[in-house]
Amino acid sequence: MREGIEGKVCLVTGAAGGIGSATARLFARQGAAVALFDRDEDGVTRLAADLNAEGLRAFGAAMDVRDLAAYTQAVERTEREFGGLDFIVNVAGGGSRQTLATMSSDDWHAIVDLNLTGPFNSIKAGAPALRRRGGGAIVTVASLAALTMSMNNGLSYTAAKAGVLGLTRHAAFELGRDNIRVNAVLPGPVLTPQMQAKLSPEKLAAVPKTLPLGRWVKAEEVAAPILFFCSPMSSACTGTHVVIDCGLHVGAPTSRDEYERSRDFQASAS
Ligand SMILES: NC(=O)c1ccc[n+]([C@@H]2O[C@H](COP(=O)([O-])OP(=O)(O)OC[C@H]3O[C@@H](n4cnc5c(N)ncnc54)[C@H](O)[C@@H]3O)[C@@H](O)[C@H]2O)c1
């Protein structure tokens, strides 16, 4: 899918993390120059050096997506280094496990700032740069929790990710006439190093059992639809989203094994 990606410039936030680094690698290997930002400066600097060693165009720098002025500087630096900006992928995000009972007002604002204000800043800071190129694409990273609820994170995360979908739709309307498309990806359970560190071995083994595909999503499988939303293959898509969850959204209440056992029972009863 190099067409429409090769020679373009893509800014990725959260690029030191699981999905962000997979996205950065995919765009760079498809011929885009990639500007990698994260609050983890070492992580993005290392990734950029790895990509440079492959002969690909990348730089990495620290940035906090919650800070509009910092986002604007990141956009300006990308334009200076690579001569313009075509795509913005706002991956940075994360949750807290606080419940309604334990969540303070500060906890709430911290999660909403990261997961909803961050994508707003990407659009606010980035749209003028994309307009200067005659158009482009912005991809926000929400979550299946935007349509359901998060089991790993608290209600602030569910609410913020649902807000990302509203932001994506409304920005798509306002930016359509500038030839800027805005779309969202909704990952389900993605097995990133950070997820592996967070969950017990029992939970890691239990998650895939109710999924139609019977396995975790790989970070690269989220990067691919992000690339699709930036490429001309999705030229008529804006304000929409794709769910990438190995089928979690179908909502199977039991494991596949239990489902088969219940069918055996019904077959022998009839
Ligand atoms: N892993 C999953 O199962 C899953 C599922 C649904 C949605 N998501 C979403 O996908 C995105 C990436 O998730 P991941 O699993 O790769 O997580 P990750 O923790 O591996 O990566 C997140 C990255 O964001 C960076 N970051 C955090 N706060 C930041 C800030 N204020 N400014 C700049 N960078 C910041 C972190 O340093 C980290 O590198 C997040 O938005 C997450 O909510 C993940």
Image (cartoon, grey):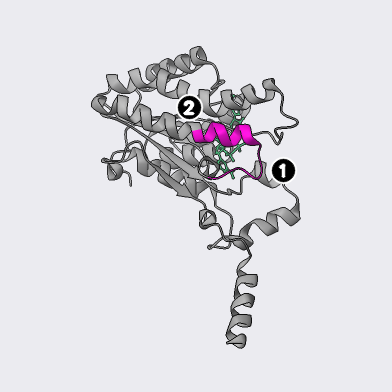
Residue at far top of view: 69
Q: Percent position (x, y) of residue 247?
A: 51, 57
Q: Measuring 75% from the left and 50% from the top, which residue is drawn there?
A: 200
Q: Amino acid at mark 1?
A: Lys
Q: Give the residue type at disc 2.
A: Pro
Q: Quadrant of residue 152?
A: top right
Q: Position of residue 15 (x, y in %)?
A: 53, 33
Horizontal and vertical percent for residue 178?
A: 25, 24
Membership of 154 in magenta stretch: yes
Q: Could you say which disc has been placed on residue 198 in the image?
A: 1
Circle 1 SS class: helix
Q: Is residue 156 left or right of residue 28?
A: right
Query: Which image quadrant is residue 208 in?
Result: bottom right
Q: Is residue 158 above or below residue 77?
A: below
Name the residue: 55% across, 48% down. 188
Residue range corresponding to the magenta coloring: 148-162
Numbered circle sitting on residue 187: none
Q: Position of residue 164 (x, y in %)?
A: 48, 32
Query: Which residue is found at the position 29% from the left and 39% from the top?
Result: 4
Q: Quadrant of residue 110?
A: top right
Q: Residue 261, relative to residue 210: is it above or below?
A: below
Tell which of 16 and 164 is nearer to you: 164
Residue at numbered disc 2? 119
